[in-house]
Image (spheres, coloured by chain):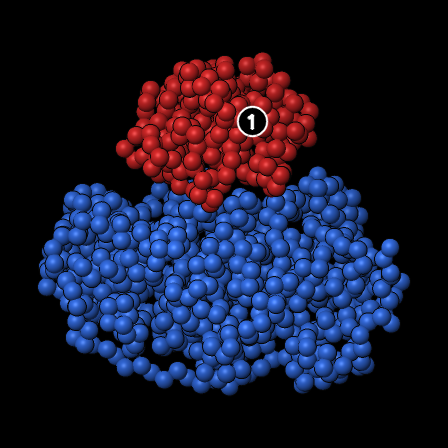
Chain colours: A blue, B red
Amino acid sequence: MSVTHTPDREPKVTAELAAEHGLKPDEYASMLESVGRTPTLTELGIYSVMWSEHCSYKSSRVWLKKLPTTAPWVICGPGENAGVIDIGDGQAAIFKMESHNHPSFIEPYQGAATGVGGILRDVFTMGARPVANLNALRFGEPANPKTRHLVAGVVAGIGGYGNCVGVPTVGGETNFHKAYNGNCLVNAMTVGVAQTDKIFYSKAAGVGKPVVYVGSKTGRDGIHGATMSSAEFTEDSEAKRPTVQVGDPFTEKLLIEACLELMATDAIVAIQDMGAAGLTSSSVEMAGKGGLGIDLDLDAVPQREAGMTPYEIMLSESQERMLMILEPGREEEAKRIFDKWELDFAVIGKLTDNGRMVIRMHGHTWCDVELAPLFDKAPLYNRPTEPTPPQAEIAAAEAPLKASARDTLLALLGTPDLASRRWIWEQYDSQVGADTMIGPGGDAALVRVHGTPKALAMTTDCTPRYCYADPVRGGAQAVAEAYRNIITVGALPLAITDNMNFGNPEKPRIMGQFAGCIEGMAEACRVLDFPVVSGNVSLYNETNGEGILPTPAIGGVGLLTDSTLAIGSGFKAEGDVVLLLGETKGHVGQSLYLREVHGREEGAPPPVDLAAERRAGDLVRGLIEARKLTACHDLADGGLAVGLAEMALRGKKGVALTGLEAADAGLLFGEDQGRYLVTAAAGDVAAVTDAAKAAGVPVTTLGTVGGDAIAGLGGGALALADLREAHEGWLPGYMAGDA
Amino acid sequence: MKSAVIVFPGSNCERDIAVALEQVSGHKTFHAWHRDTDLPEVDVIAVPGGFSYGDYLRCGAMAANSPVMRVVKERAAKGVKVIGVCNGFQILTEAGLLPGALIRNQSLKYICKTVDLKVENTDSAFTRHYTPGQHIGIPVGHGEGNYVADEETLKRLEGDGRVAFRYTDANGVVNAAGNPNGATNNIAGIFNETRTVLGMMPHPERAFDPQHGNTDGRALFTSLLESLS
């Protein structure tokens, strides 16, 4: 028999208790002022999560405002559950990327799985059917004893969730670096497709309208997840495992179908998923955006366990739950749909006109506060910033080849950051939906918009070592690389989502990295017409005072209106001519070559000439549209030689190169930006060259596709079989414990 | 050719296989719900891939006991063609329409990739457009595709030509290197005694359209069309 919980059994709220909830003394003082009395425990809980870094973006808001967020094709920019862009024919693409870093480090399988679940909900809550998942993962150095365990768990968790809900995981990126030893990064992205006249928002409207809870029951899992994610890790972080949520992808699948079925009617006024801070943030945000109050009756909330307190119910981060405002009188119709899908459905409150958040349970009132301060009086910090000192440029002559070009290339392709990720992506269902044209392992993924000639291109990109050395350049480069990757398949880059992963913002050096990355991103977004429509900020990625590399992961989306134009990144046909578009100066600073061969993680990263990026991008897209190219690959990590090797491996065809036998490290492995490797049938080479010249883009002929080796590099021919073994061997070997 | 696809809570390939059936036949595929107790008159029933009931008990075990499966069994007994793909194959074995069982992949990991297959028997409504021994590639996506059966059953399957597809290496050779999940005798798909029911782990609907980059699964659907019209 359970004892009914009563207010007099709750601990009294004090400054100490507020501090334990993560509120700084001045924040607690501000809360007292807003509430006008000593708050109840439930009120403290609600304030602490709403004012946490995770929910309030209190350190980042002033900077995020600097990002361009509009374009004629942007239907909804940041501020909603996800960003919305117009893709023509009355259709919209809805997408966002979100981090689940802290939970994934503590409990990799569930942390990653619920990261996927959460971002899926952000997208289908707006009326979109999710059509693709991507991710951006960073792990510690391979030698770190925890890395293998984290890779295995995170990959299994992403697959376990995404495969079951039936949304293909079509792309992503993975890096290893010692800066992530104590904080792995798990950034998950979902792209969905909706009708532009059926997009749902979270702003509540209509006094007296019912507040409806659907989905899974509420349990005690994930309480304080948002607060946990807003603090640094210490050695006792293992003890925080109970704050990690547990995912149920089967229920999520049912929830997607049930919500989309209800959305086909006009019964929904507003809808919001219960993500971080669960019922608290969803109810506060919906009522708050509508300028209304909300009354909640927690006795009506479906509960998984007996004896839960209002505090626990409001702070639970149980997964697979949604909150919606319905049109009055439509409850029965909506309930029938959720009954069909065997999901809970409960009317748990109503909208009010008094601007207050009132929570009742067991005949008592547990919370009665003005609602607006929860989100509009949340702390806002303009934290001090300290710029990153500029790094010296490193001349290629300072870093000569130590072995032949052939042997250097072979070695590089087997290093952790360049080795094949096949071991990862083969654990993801990349094809469910039967619309995947280009899946993992390409430059950008390409997924057809079902039943139309269109396809969406998508990619995730960031080069954290560049961002660390020069945040402004690094921020611009991340956006430019996403842009380039989308261009390579023939699509028009439309918009991005950003996932800003940084250390402790209270340190000026870290905040300087944040500000610098934003500056570089903003400039790139403007020049490339590639606005930010959604995003997420994850700060305090530090353990025992050691921060991660600044990692503004960019998720880019583009549109290919005629999917038959698409080309891949593997060599296509024997005899095709290989051309390099873009300028090569031989920039070795911060290159993987410099790090792996010379052991130097140094220098300035490559500059990003955004006007040149734009010229090259427009040129390549035009050539693909004119069907003049047979394959296209952007040059990034590892530079020209690695790019050639990747095209050869992907296409299972060799290449005979000319004029590169005496090439130096800068030419072969420098990471100059704004470059594409393309192939064209012999008869089209003149047209490609002429178009490049007309566009002012440097063009160089490099050789001819054919054979089963990369021939023409110093040191002799490199057989594809040997290259493949090195490239494919590292990750499976490492995961099996061989390395 | 009229077709139905069975939808369980957690199915996620029903649209994909319906698209293939509709494109070859020109007829709309009927979507049946797991609680349905009757089906329209159809020539072929597809049990699709996915995670019916979350695969939380044992893959296919709960779906096999759903109301609609009673109708599927009745129709199968009357000779209506039934194809189960991936989770659908698991459901058909759990329902007793096909022998054996599908257990966890030997690697203990989910695997999604295009596998090489040998078409073992073209004397069926599902495989007549392939050539005997044809080497094809079709994608798989499963965590439990490791086919097992008792020796007696295996003997009958092998002796009666009821193995439809077998995993091979890239050169078309049936060997351990080409076996993605540890399946006994590299079995990727089997028929019932009358070869009117087919269960297979690979997804022919994912190798159907030129934009899939591979159309090796298409002949399965055209075979059905020809034999049923």
Do we see residue A634 in this rendering? Answer: no
Residue B116 in the figure: left or right of residue A40: left
Residue at 55%, 44% (x, y): give it: A164
Hey, what amino acid is under mark 1?
Answer: Leu
In percent of width and height, residue A507 lies at 50, 83
Residue A31: where, in percent of width, then height?
72, 80
Residue displayed at 68% across by 85% down:
A25
Which quarter of the figure has residue A269? bottom right
- Nearer to the camera, A473 or A311: A311
Say which quadrant the C terminus of chain A sits in.
Answer: bottom left
Q: Tell me if residue A142 comes above or below residue A399 in the rendering.
A: above
Q: Is residue B116 left or right of residue A496?
A: left
| Chain letter for the residue marked with disc 1 in the picture | B
Residue indicated by mark 1: B92
Position of A675 with respect to A478 (left or right) is left
Q: Residue at x 53, y 69 (%)?
A: A537
Can the viewer see residue A288 in this picture? yes
- Secondary structure of residue under mark 1: helix
Report how many numbered discs are placed on residues in the image: 1
Relative image position of residue A497 (x, y in whole percent)? 48, 62
